[in-house]
Amino acid sequence: MSTATIENRRASEDLVLPAATLAAFAARVLHALGVSEPDAEAASQLLVEADLTGADAHGIFRLPQYATMIRQGAINPTPSITVHRSAAATAIVDGGDGLGHLVMKKAAETAVELAREAGIGWVGARNSNHAGSASIWAALPVEHGMIGLYSAVASANHMAIWGGTEPALGTNPLAIGLPAGDGNLLMLDMATTVVSYGTIKKYALHGKPLPEGWMIDRRSGGPLTDPGQSAEGLLLPIGGYKGSGLALMLGFLAGTLNGAAMGLDVVDFNAVSNQPTNTGQFVVALDVNRFRPLAEFESEVRRHAEALKAGARLPGVDAIRLPGENRSARRTERLRQGVPLPAPLLQRLNDLARELGTAPLA
């Protein structure tokens, strides 16, 4: 199929491509932008992991934005990522303004190393960048029989402190992963707003109106449903003032504690592409075996999960689902069948490939 044929597909039609094809494409693009081949391959695999798990607004969708930030100097394609172990169970990673996926890969791996020695590893990061889906980093410790936690200061402010009208807080996500045995896990991955801003971007890409209750107009306080006007709006926090408070405290832990940007100091990477963002993040690894045998813990997690799922359901509820179930099922399905790619995004990616002189997706 020619590139022209692909780009002329109806906007409503998705092209389904293997994850390996998307990762290889992303690696070509990043390498053309000056990222070393090993780093480009590692970052691309982690980038596409978001697509596999269904976090489409945080996967290859973000590649053109990362490319712009590299070209304009906000992201360093050849960073020096350093680790300072500040105590037996703590460390700070300085990302050197590199790709967030590479910075957080180092941070998560360091957290696991610390937890093996001390039982817990808490690793903060500064001078990092947007690193995709939060669940990727909470899942990495789970692969080592540990509990994983992750949070970040979001790369733009789209929420006000409760009662305010100024965008002063981000969607500051929280992810918690638990091992459940046989390669399974429970995974809570949530923004502290009703939806992530990436979801707003996804609706804008498709030209779809936003449901009421996601955003409000920051001048009138009324509902905002046009994604094209999102710059004039505020994302609503989960649980009212509670979500706003949670975003604030996570911002202090992921940003201020690490010497990274937070609050009004955050650089909006949607509006500014030539200035380092000093994004802050943290990842925690907790060794289950320090509390009880891993197999015993996993068995208990499964027992509770099965009991909860077997409970009585409200009318109209077809099944009780636990955090991460859809994520795991979607990953299995997309590994087998491929990742759907909307036609507008496909065109955007192929335009980028042509600009860089690399092979397009076809």
Image (cartoon, helix red, strand yellow):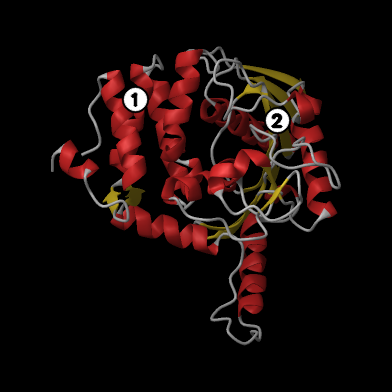
For discs 2 and 1, the disc positioned in front in the rendered view: 1
Which residue occupies 75% across, 23% down?
265
Residue neighbourhood size for the residue with mark 2, other residues' Cα within 10 Å, grouped as few (<14), some (14–19), many (≥20): many
Residue 71, placed above or below residue 335: above
Instruction: Give the x, y percent position of residue 123.
Output: 70, 30
Which residue occupies 36% across, 41% down?
345
Where does the C terminus fall, quadrant-wise? top left
For residue 123, the mark is: 2
Q: Which amino acid does the dot numbered 2 rest on?
A: Val
223 lies left or right of 41: right
Count of marks placed on residues: 2
Q: Which amino acid does the dot numbered 1 rest on?
A: Val
For residue 121, the mark is: none
Where does the N terminus fall, quadrant-wise? top left
Which residue occupies 62% across, 29% down?
107
Residue 91, placed above or below residue 231: above
Query: To which residue does mark 1 refer?
Result: 29
Q: Secondary structure at mark 2?
A: strand
Instruction: Give the x, y percent position of residue 277.
Output: 64, 21
Toward the front, the furthest residue is 220
Q: CA distance from mark 2 to mark 1?
A: 30 Å
